[in-house]
């Protein structure tokens, strides 16, 4: 029996421990809180990603994407992580507002063979769609491309959309050699240089690990789709043929009220929650497409950028239509962060592969903020390609994009900064001191050093 | 005094080696990035006018003209680079656009340091793609010279103007950053090959920096 088989057998088991009911000592939430313990192992595996071929991958608990983790607001979460990879890694809980010691940033690598317990509490109001992925120094893009990414959902007890059937769409793409192995170009090849500019885009797009899947829907019904852009660089401009969409949330959970949209642009690491009203006839079908989106610099814009891609077929069942469901007009309250409270205004300049003209240095602190401070960050992109901004640890609200005020309030941890564009956000560093990353979420740019470190301290110095 | 002369002749090489050693140590211990020259705005203005910056970047030789150095404002100011410049429709064909050189933060050089402008003029490096550092190397990957340099698009003649002195190039940077009012004029990025012209500028026709010693085969000592 090959040893790799044995190690996979040992580690591949998804150990969702039985939730243990405890009473919240902190009294943050009324009623019982739970402690949820689970085990995640990152290990090499051999799986079939593209039908008909197999690939050497890295997998969480033997799966690509990794298991979908579901929690409730108020849960105290303990994740026992084992690194069975041949290289250092971390797990970053993308978007969660949790202590910096559990953030899984490049500052806390887990060596090969090592283990770490990620421990955090999911605060009230944190219900939303998140994801988890590695974040080691310079290897994030490689490890995610090898298969390490998964969805994480936090649910609220008073979810206004409870009962509506859900789908999870984790969008990712990859590039393969003819023999099925994941294709990483040699560092000096022209393709590697183009990847360095554009970020690595693959010609195979996966929807939660499947290529062009078919999902079903019953005419007249409604589905709630949670969509995650887990791609290294591909930006998705999503439209569902023949259907209008209703957006109900972003990175940090639900809006205050539903917003009708024709399409959704989802930059790297961003999430959206939408409602799909099944307005089609029984037996009909509709295709979810990624429409052309020009995020590129003209020098490296792909020749096929202007073509659409089919992602998923939505097949209507033959059943008679159900009566349309009434949707709530109001979802929840999103309290405003008040610009009058902002004590600090920062300008963060994105250029190609750099922030403020510098590459990341793990020994350097680039910005210092005082614990409890409300700040306005103005992120300016001075180059001719889009760069999606991501801040670790704190949800923020977008104030305006290119001077145009944001039409409604939402919580985000990532925002696309379009070519030669400026985005202003407001954020409150309300707890959790420590060192936090902010960076471009095109993974190749992040790995090249398009990242800075924010230190949140009690003094702000 | 033949004896003394002999002694002196022995002493000179000895002293020389001591001096050399001292110089070598001084050079070695010297700060790796000495303070760059402080540019002079008016000298920079003179250089900008005499080097025809405005012919492409706007305003020709008239600093009072509207759009002075503010970049492309109409398609006639764009360039076609490649065979299509001669034969319409021929490929490859890149449209390049003189940039806004005024210190506007969003659309001009406002967010770039004078050092980045110096690096653009001396090494041809696009300021938005190049770290704000002092470059001491002459080839990619050496002395802060980027591993994969992104060069300014043709026909920007930085290969000629890199031969100006450090002081002169910093004078130009000073004028662009401190001697001009910002003008908001967004110029679309230039097109180009994915190597950002690295292959083109490897052509020996552009010579080297610094220029070869005088006289070359084409030149005579008067």
Image (cartoon, rainbow, N blue to C red):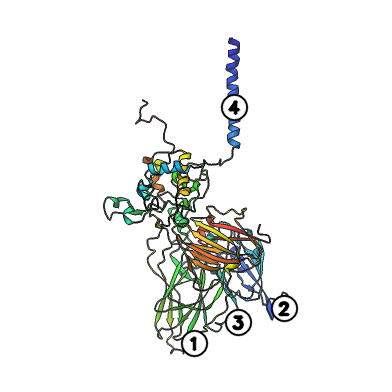
Can you see residue A278? yes
The label nearer to you, 4 versus 2, is 4
Distance, label 4 to label 2, CA atoms, is 79 Å
For residue B19, the mark is 4
**Residues at circles 3 and 1 in contact by the CB criterion of under 8 Å:** no
For residue B35, the mark is none
Position of residue B12 relative to residue A116, above or below, is above
Local packing at callout 2 (Cα closer than 10 Å; few below 14, some 14-19, many 20+) is: some
Q: Secondary structure at mark 4?
A: helix
Decide which of A356, A146 is in the foreground and name it: A356
Q: Earlier in the sequence, mark 1 or mark 2?
A: 2
**Residues at circles 1 and 4 in contact by the CB criterion of under 8 Å:** no
Q: Label 1 belongs to which residue?
A: A325
Query: Where is residue A259 shown, x and y percent of the image?
Result: 48, 77
Q: Earlier in the sequence, mark 3 or mark 2?
A: 2
Q: Label 2 belongs to which residue?
A: A23
Q: Are marks 3 and 1 on the same chain?
A: yes
Please report, as a chain letter, where disc 2 is located. Answer: A
Decide which of A404, A123 is in the foreground and name it: A404
Local packing at callout 4 (Cα closer than 10 Å; few below 14, some 14-19, many 20+) is: few
Q: Are marks 1 and 4 on the same chain?
A: no
Q: Label 3 belongs to which residue?
A: A158
For the point 68% across and 61% down, which residue is it? A458
Q: Are marks 3 and 2 on the same chain?
A: yes
- Outermost residue toward the front in this view: B64
Q: Secondary structure at mark 3?
A: loop
Query: Where is residue A119 shown, x and y percent of the image?
Result: 67, 68
């Amino acid at each position: 029996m090959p040893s790799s088989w044995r190690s996979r057998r040992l580690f591949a088991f998804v150990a969702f421990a039985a939730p243990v009911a405890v009473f919240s000592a902190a009294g943050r939430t009324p009623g019982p809180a739970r402690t949820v313990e689970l085990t995640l192992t990152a290990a090499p595996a051999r799986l079939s990603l593209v039908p008909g071929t197999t690939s050497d991958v890295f997998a969480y608990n033997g799966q690509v994407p990794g298991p979908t983790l579901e929690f409730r607001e108020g849960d105290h979460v303990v994740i026992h992580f084992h690194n069975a990879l041949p290289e250092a890694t971390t797990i970053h809980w993308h978007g969660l507002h949790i202590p910096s010691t559990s953030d899984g940033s490049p500052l806390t690598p887990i060596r090969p063979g090592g283990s770490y317990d990620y421990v955090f509490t999911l605060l009230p109001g944190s219900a939303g769609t998140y994801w988890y992925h590695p974040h080691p120094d310079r290897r994030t893009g490689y490890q995610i491309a090898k298969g390490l990414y998964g969805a994480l959902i936090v649910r609220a007890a008073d979810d206004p959309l409870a009962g509506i059937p859900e789908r999870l769409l984790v969008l990712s793409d990859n590039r393969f050699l003819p023999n099925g192995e994941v294709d990483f170009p040699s560092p000096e090849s022209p393709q590697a240089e183009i990847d360095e500019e554009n970020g690595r885009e693959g010609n195979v797009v996966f929807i939660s690990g499947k290529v062009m899947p078919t999902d079903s829907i019953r005419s007249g019904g409604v589905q709630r789709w949670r969509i995650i852009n887990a791609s290294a660089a591909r930006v998705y401009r999503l439209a569902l043929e023949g259907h209008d969409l209703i957006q109900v949330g972003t990175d940090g959970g639900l809006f205050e009220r539903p917003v009708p949209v024709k399409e959704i642009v989802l930059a790297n690491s961003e999430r959206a929650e939408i409602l799909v009203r099944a307005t089609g006839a029984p037996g009909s079908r509709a295709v979810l497409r990624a429409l052309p989106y020009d995020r590129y610099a003209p020098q490296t814009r792909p020749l096929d950028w202007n073509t659409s891609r089919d992602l998923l077929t939505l097949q209507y069942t033959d059943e008679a239509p159900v009566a349309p469901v009434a949707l709530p007009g109001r979802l929840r309250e999103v309290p405003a962060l008040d610009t009058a409270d902002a004590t600090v205004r920062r300008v963060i300049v994105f250029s190609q592969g750099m922030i403020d003209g510098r590459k990341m240095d793990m020994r350097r602190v680039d910005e210092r903020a005082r614990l409890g401070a409300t700040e306005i960050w103005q992120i300016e992109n001075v180059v001719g390609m889009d760069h999606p901004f991501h801040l670790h640890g704190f949800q923020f609200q977008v104030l305006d994009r290119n001077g145009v005020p944001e039409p409604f309030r939402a919580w985000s941890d990532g925002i696309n900064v379009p070519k030669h564009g400026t985005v202003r956000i407001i954020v409150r560093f309300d707890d959790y001191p420590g060192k936090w990353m902010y960076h471009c979420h095109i993974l190749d740019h992040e790995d090249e050093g398009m990242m800075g470190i924010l230190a949140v301290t009690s003094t702000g110095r | 005094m033949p004896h003394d002369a002999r002694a002196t002749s022995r002493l000179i090489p000895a002293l020389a080696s001591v001096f050399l050693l001292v110089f070598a140590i001084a050079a070695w211990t010297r700060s790796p990035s000495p303070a760059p020259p402080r540019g002079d705005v008016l000298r920079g203005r003179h250089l900008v006018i005499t080097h025809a910056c405005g012919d492409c970047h706007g305003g020709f030789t008239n600093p009072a003209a509207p759009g002075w150095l503010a970049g492309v404002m109409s398609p006639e100011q764009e360039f076609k680079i490649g065979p299509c410049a001669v034969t319409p429709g021929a490929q490859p064909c890149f449209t390049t656009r003189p940039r806004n050189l005024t210190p506007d933060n969003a659309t001009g050089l406002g967010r770039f340091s004078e050092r980045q402008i110096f690096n653009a003029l001396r090494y041809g490096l696009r300021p938005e793609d190049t770290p704000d550092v002092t470059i001491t190397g002459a080839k990619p990957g050496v002395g802060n010279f980027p591993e994969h340099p992104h060069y300014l698009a043709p026909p920007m003649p930085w290969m000629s103007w890199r031969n100006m002195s450090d002081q002169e190039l910093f004078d130009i940077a000073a004028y662009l950053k401190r001697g001009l009012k910002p003008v908001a004029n967004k110029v679309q990025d230039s097109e180009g090959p994915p190597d950002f012209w690295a292959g083109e500028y490897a052509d020996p026709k552009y010579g080297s920096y610094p220029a070869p010693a005088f006289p070359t085969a084409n030149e005579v000592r008067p």
